[in-house]
Amino acid sequence: MKFKNMKVLNDVVLDYNNPFKMFELAKEYDKLKQGAAAFGWYLRAADFCKGETYEEKELQYKCMVLGAAIFARSEARTQTVKGLIKSAITVLPARPEAYYWAAKYSIDQSNFRNAIMYAKMGKDCEDVEPNEELDYPGPVGLEYCYAIAKWKSDGRDDSKNLFFDLKHKRKLDMPDEMSKSVDWWIEQVGYPSTLPYTQNEKHKYRYKFDGLDTVVKNYSRHFQDMFVLSLLNGKRDGSFVEIGSGHPTLFNNTYLLEKDFGWKGLSVEWSERMCAQFSRERKTNIILADATKIDYSELFKQNCIEQRVDFLRINSDTSSYNVLKSIPFHKYEFNVFQFQHNSCWWGNEVRDASRDFIRNLGYVLFVPDVAVSEEQPYEDWWVHPALINNSMKSKNQINFAWNYFMKERT
Amino acid sequence: MHDLHTGGLANYALKRGGSLHPICIPTEVLGNETGIMNPSIFQHNGKLLVNVRHVNYYLYHSEGKQFPHQWGPLVYIHPETDVTLRTHNVMCELDKNMNMINAQRVNMVLDTEPTWNFIGLEDARLFSWDDKLFLCGVRRDCYDAKGKGRMEMANIEFVNGEWTELSRHPIPAPGDDGSYCEKNWMPILDMPYHFVKWTNPTQVIKFDIENGTTEDAIYDASKFVEANKDFRGGSQVIRINEHQRMAFVHETNLLRDPFGRKDGNYAHRIIVWDNDWNIVHKSKEFHFMGTYYDHVKAQDYNIEFVTGATMYGNDILISYGWQDNASYILRMPQNVFANFLYGE
């Protein structure tokens, strides 16, 4: 092994009070994995610096961060790593790199609460571009640490969304190694059970419609409400029938339609608790009943449902097919029709039977096997033949909702 | 006038035709990135060899106290799971330009189960007597559980592709051998089995390697040379002309911060003896890499340690450790060195 850059050493010897030159020497040692020598010079550089100007503070900051990195790659020197990172933060608390290192190191130490804290603090810092010198990948690094720490800390489903967001929204910002790590994490934790649309991703949304600008976020798990609006071009004052509505807002497929687009309709739900909450929070009429025991002709009549309904949704778990067969299709037509068959969990029997049944009614299978992930289909989306919009008709056998709706950044 | 005090001897040498050479040992040899320190340079059978002490810690020395460790300004950073201070010796061969040809850990095959937590042969000086190559340093892991330290000579040789310890020779303190710790004895290269045990007043010890006994060869308390601090051992004692020998010695200033936590400053001098072991000259005090100077306390801070020196062609090579973290060889033209030694 040869120390090639003798100039940096000679510069330090000849200009012995110059911390910037000491820093360059330290980096040279660091490159050669001569950690002790590198650290010695980082520390001297920091100590010889007065820390009066931003440039001087930045030098001290870098010395502390890179010093911490040396100890982080050595064995069991946690107190020293933490101390150096804290020193860096003390020098320039508005810079994110030290928080990134702190979060990353806390994850390595399985101290996930600390990692969450540091990642959050880093995310609130001034927006600093990736910094190769400090091995800082940019804000995406903090999001990456936050995702891991959050998941490891709470194991909540919404923590999975953080990994998903990294993979699908920040892929191009991540270094290769981080990108691979995110793929690994997604493989471990699985896809989130909901993929929300938010306004700041409007530019990536494929099927724009009138009023899209006003949609701050949606509520469905996988864009079901957005599909209806896209297909009907943001129709206002539309109508719906929702069988198996669940929570009035959370993951609800009609709340956006009602709230932002003035739709009216009818919801059916067997859970007394959900119904009670629905009644408090929604304008829509909710029926508390077992969906398989309803006379839908009578129900629709009583609720003045018009013969042409914009949106029908059936989600009654294992009973969905029975419910499907009891809908009075001979009297009522539906522009958009979503049927949840859950084939990824329960097999293809219900799906295949429902498809035969609905096809015979003349509807067109527009988006088959809408999926939670690239390989977990759970429902079909049908469209009335009069409304076929070829630009939205999927040619894929399985349609991972995110990929169907959102353009990847290139 | 020169800036020796603030810039150090390396600065002085570089400005006058000298050169400084860092010793870098690959992590494949070391196994980690911890300190390589206190190198001892020596010419043996036409080869330029340096023994380097590799420890299991990083020295954290915040000289300016702007960024002290939570445990103080001067802290040994071991693995938190390991309270031992471990030393391995790494033998390096250099070419004439001080580039490393090879480096290999010395296999101390005669090591036994340590009795204390400073483990290994520390601050070993490299030298040859009777055509045998020796490492001689202090061992504190062989005597008791309280850290009793004695100098030990290890005869090493390059055998079957590796540097190996062939024999080991503990050196008792002269007299009743009752002291707690002996260290930094300086081997006198042209007087086999003699060491300068103490510099001022000079005490030369003769070691009987066959019987494992020591006796005073030279000691006259009246030969004390006026000095503020003790001169402690450093390099080998090398002959510089037919009338004189010299060695690099160090002076320690062990300090405490306001909270009682340790800090320190190590400075060096060159001592010249005549053939009767009278100290006939001492250089000015110096550092190699300069120091952090605290103007409020009028105090220097730096840790350096010389453990080797050798005349090499028209130059002198001085090997030293910096902050227990790095090792260097300073090459100085001999005339420049002489000017420095006797005052420019």
Image (tube, coloured by chain):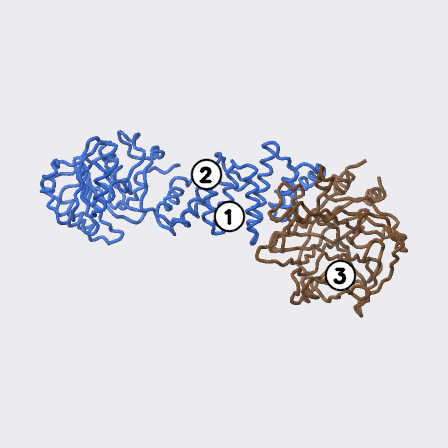
Verify CB contact (< 8 Å) between mark 1 and mark 2.
Answer: no
In the image, residue A398 lies at what x, y percent?
A: 28, 46
Q: CA distance from mark 1 to mark 3?
A: 44 Å
In the image, the chain rendered in blue is: A
Q: Residue at x 55, y 43 (%)?
A: A86
Q: Amino acid at mark 1?
A: Tyr
Q: CA distance from mark 3 to mark 2?
A: 58 Å
Q: Is residue A273 left or right of residue B268?
A: left
Task: Mark 1 or mark 2: name the one nearer the start of the chain.
Answer: 1
In the image, the chain rendered in brown is: B
Task: Give the chain letter at badge 3.
Answer: B
Q: Which residue is mark 3?
A: B134
* Callout 3 secondary element: strand
In the image, residue B206 lies at what x, y percent?
A: 83, 63
Q: Residue at x 79, y 68 (%)?
A: B212
Q: Amino acid at mark 3?
A: Phe
Q: Is residue B314 left or right of residue B149?
A: right
Q: Residues within 10 Å of mark 3 (few under 14, many from 20)?
A: many
* Callout 2 secondary element: helix
Query: Looking at the rendering, in which quadrant would you find the C terminus of chain B?
Result: top right
Q: Which residue is mark 2?
A: A123
Examine the image and state in which quarter residue B184 appears.
bottom right
Is B105 rendered above or below residue B97?
A: below
Q: Amino acid at mark 2?
A: Lys
Q: Which residue is mark 1?
A: A105
